[in-house]
Image: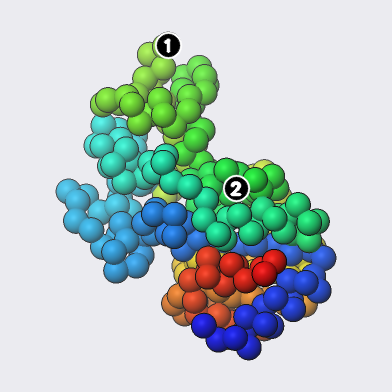
Amino acid sequence: MNSDKIKRFLEIVESSRKIVFFGGAGVSTESGIPDFRSVDGLYNQQYDFPPEEILSHGFFMKNTEEFYRFYRDRMLYLDAKPNTAHLKLAELEKRGVLTAVVTQNIDGLHQAAGSEKVFELHGSVHRNYCMNCHKEYDAHFILNSSGVPRCECGGIIKPDVVLYGEALGDDAVIGSVNAIANADTLIIGGTSLNVYPASGLIRYYSGDNLVIINMSHTQTDKNADLLIHEKIGGVFSHIGE
């Protein structure tokens, strides 16, 4: 790991007062949750249908039972624990220097680590609701159900996650835009920045330090003030040393 880059990263963190963290699947891979686009990710495994199709609104509506077979098997990692990155971000929030986490992940690990200001752009597996009466159910109910999970009223239960073909939630988008626009430092970590419209939100940033921490290249690398191609947990482990 490049010691000069780590030193610069720590200097930026220590001098900042309004840090926003924008993260993706790479933040949770160190907790044992596979990402979508790496060599071993979900999108490179074989199923009867492509994962992008299964995780779409149209597929959910037309092939609900098949959707849930995939969803239970590949999207619910309820035993996963927060890793170093999650924990260090929560520490920065408690110190008053991190104002928000904007995440594309749906696993709830930022909250489990203690972060309170979290904008979940793609929803959460931990929230599920009846499409008929809107009664809420937790993720364990979904995991332990079989076939198509149904409410007491008979309605189909849907995860509160944003599927392909669905719009991002207004509250999450507005909150994310406001946080990013007011940040003095934006740390982007564990994301390829290939998923729109979520990745488009970083265009609202106009602060002093744009930091990108990702194992692979992103289309925004050229704009970074600091670019680190390392695992995010390893980089964040140096905070507070």
Circle 2 residue: 113
User: How many numbered marks are there?
Assistant: 2
On residue 122, the disc is none
Residue at image point 62% right, 71% down: 238
Can residue 180 be seen from the camera position used here? no
Percent position (x, y) of residue 217? 47, 79
Residue at image point 38% right, 13% down: 154
In the image, taking residue 28 as reference, residue 238 lies left or right, namely right
Q: CA distance from mark 2 to mark 1?
A: 35 Å
Q: Which three-letter amino acid code belongs to the residue tagged 2?
A: Ala
Q: From what the image shows, is residue 202 above or below residue 132? A: below
Can residue 64 be seen from the camera position used here? yes
Q: From what the image shows, is residue 17 above or below residue 56? A: below
Percent position (x, y) of residue 204? 70, 66
Percent position (x, y) of residue 76? 38, 41
Earlier residue among tags 2 and 1: 2
Residue at image point 73% right, 54% down: 93
Say which of 52 and 120 sits in front.
120
Circle 1 residue: 153
Say which of 110 and 177 sits in front.
110
Colouring mode (rainbow / by chain / secondary structure / one colour): rainbow
In the image, taking residue 97 as reference, residue 195 lies left or right, namely left
Element marked by disc 2? helix
Q: Mark 2 against mark 1, which lies toward the viewer?
A: 2
Say which of 166 and 98 sits in front.
98
In the image, taking residue 170 as reference, residue 55 lies left or right, namely left
Q: From what the image shows, is residue 207 above or below residue 92? A: below
Say which of 238 and 221 sits in front.
238
Element marked by disc 1? loop
Q: Quadrant of residue 171?
A: top right
